[in-house]
Amino acid sequence: MSEEKNAFREAAIEAISDMAQHLPLDCELLLVACRPGKKDFDLVLPSPESNLNNALDALRQNGLSIDGDNAYKRDLCDAIVGTLAFGAQDRCPPPEGHWAQRFWDMGRESSANTAELVSALDLVSGCLMDALAGRDLPPSKVGLAIATSAELLAKQTV
């Protein structure tokens, strides 16, 4: 940590204690210092009782939006996309109760849906190839292809 940043940190810690004494008991205090475009001075100093989620909620209520570009949002989106991919591959599930579980489940469902659609397409194309080749088509094979395709198409519109 640079000498300048360390000096500011020490002064800020002392100031947080002084400021906290003047807050209502149910208030939380958090100090953030940053130098836009650089990470050399980023500093987040919560008071012992503060909760960073509450601080984020307060920032959002005061106009912070998800439209701006920052590393946190990029990393979060990367985590979601990766979780969707892991779900589609049916590997690396998140721990039970983890926020990413729903994205893993979505990836899993999407992959299962794709597999069902490919299977139905295989049945239909097999019937078409047999018909074009002049081969005998048992009604049961045609019926299965039609029923399977209709069922999957109905699922897609729900």
Image (cartoon, helix red, strand yellow):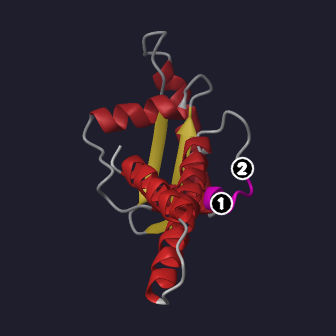
For mark 1, give the secondary structure.
Answer: helix
Question: Is there a contact, CB below 8 Å, between mark 2 and mark 1?
Answer: yes
Residue at position x 35%, y 37% from top?
A: 59
Q: Earlier in the sequence, mark 2 or mark 1?
A: 1
- Provide the residue span drawn in magenta: 86-93
Taking 119 as reference, is 42 above or below it? above
Mark yes or no: residue 75 visible: no
Residue 108, percent from left and from top: 61, 53
Taking 86 as reference, is 151 above or below it? above
For mark 2, give the secondary structure.
Answer: loop
Q: Quadrant of the C terminus?
A: top left
Residue 155, percent from left and from top: 42, 47
Residue type indicated by callout 1: Phe
Of the numbered discs in the image, which one, if any, rests on residue 86?
1
Residue at position x 46%, y 53% from top?
A: 147
Of the numbered discs in the image, which one, if any, rests on residue 93?
2
Residue 45, percent from left and from top: 56, 40
Q: Nearer the viewer, residue 88 or 40?
A: 88
